Image (cartoon, rainbow, N blue to C red):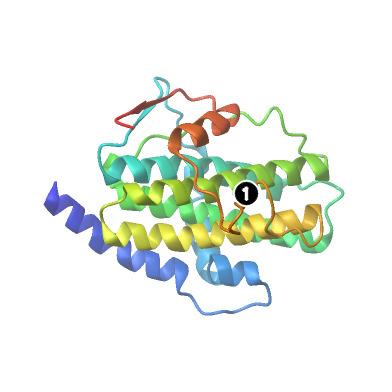
Amino acid sequence: MKNLQEQEKQELLPAERSIFTAPLQRRSFLQFAGAGAATVALIAAGCKKDRHDPMVPGGVTLNFKDDFGVLNYAYALEQLEAAFYIQVASNPPSGFSPAEKQYFQDIQYHEIAHREFFKKALGAAAIGSLEVDFSSINFTDRASVLGAAMAFEDLGVGAYNGAGVRLTTDAYLVAAGKIVSVEARHAAYVRDLISNGTFASSPQVDANGLDKALTPDVVLAAAGKYIKTKITVTNL
């Protein structure tokens, strides 16, 4: 197990650098937050085949006994976010402005990059593809899409903040810290679209002005609304 962890750490670090340290190439803070546009586009193009992976008929298990369980937890949430933004970006609401369409395209690539980052880091230990349920979201309605995006981003930020303490491998913790920074920028952007000037506000920020940390049971209960695949949690 130790050798496997060392091997994956070495594989993770270059991937993490390629995703998160690409130079600032374009005008938006989102691209700076997520990755260089060219890098992300390449990742997205390489991942198209993964959008139709077979689902997991018997469900998946998140075993929090070690770092792999935490990484799979993050992988599950990134699958959910990527699926949502792929659907939005492929057919955005008519109420979206051209700038909003572009930004949601950007966020789509960020989330696909995050999903693939964890899939690569986990290798054979990765859980399968989750089946999502977005029936509660009206993808033709701008307000419905923004509301769902805010829920996903707030949940993601809280999930990373809450799960970080469970990681024991420094490289994973650093990578998770960088990803949650990106997710927080997404959350701020979406909140600002919904209500200008509210990019960091209640209920996702506590009394000290810090993003809240949510435990996995709270996160998975909330995310369960959007996931058909049965998720079994152990050693939480």
In the image: residue 118, left or right of residue 146: left
Q: Which residue is mark 1?
A: 204
Residue 114 image position (x, y, % from top left): 47, 54
Answer with the quarter of the image where residue 210 lies: bottom right
Out of 95 and 154, give the one closest to the viewer.
154
Residue 136 image position (x, y, % from top left): 71, 28
Q: Residue at x 45, y 74 (%)?
A: 21
Residue 205 image position (x, y, % from top left): 62, 52
Disc count in the image?
1
- Residue lying farthest right? 95
Tag 1: amino acid = Gln
- Residue lying farthest top? 58
Out of 162 and 179, give the one closest to the viewer.
162
Answer with the quarter of the image where residue 29 lies: bottom right
Q: In the rendered view, would you say 180 is above or below 220? A: below
Which part of the image, by quadrant, shows the C terminus?
top left
Residue 37 seen from this side:
no
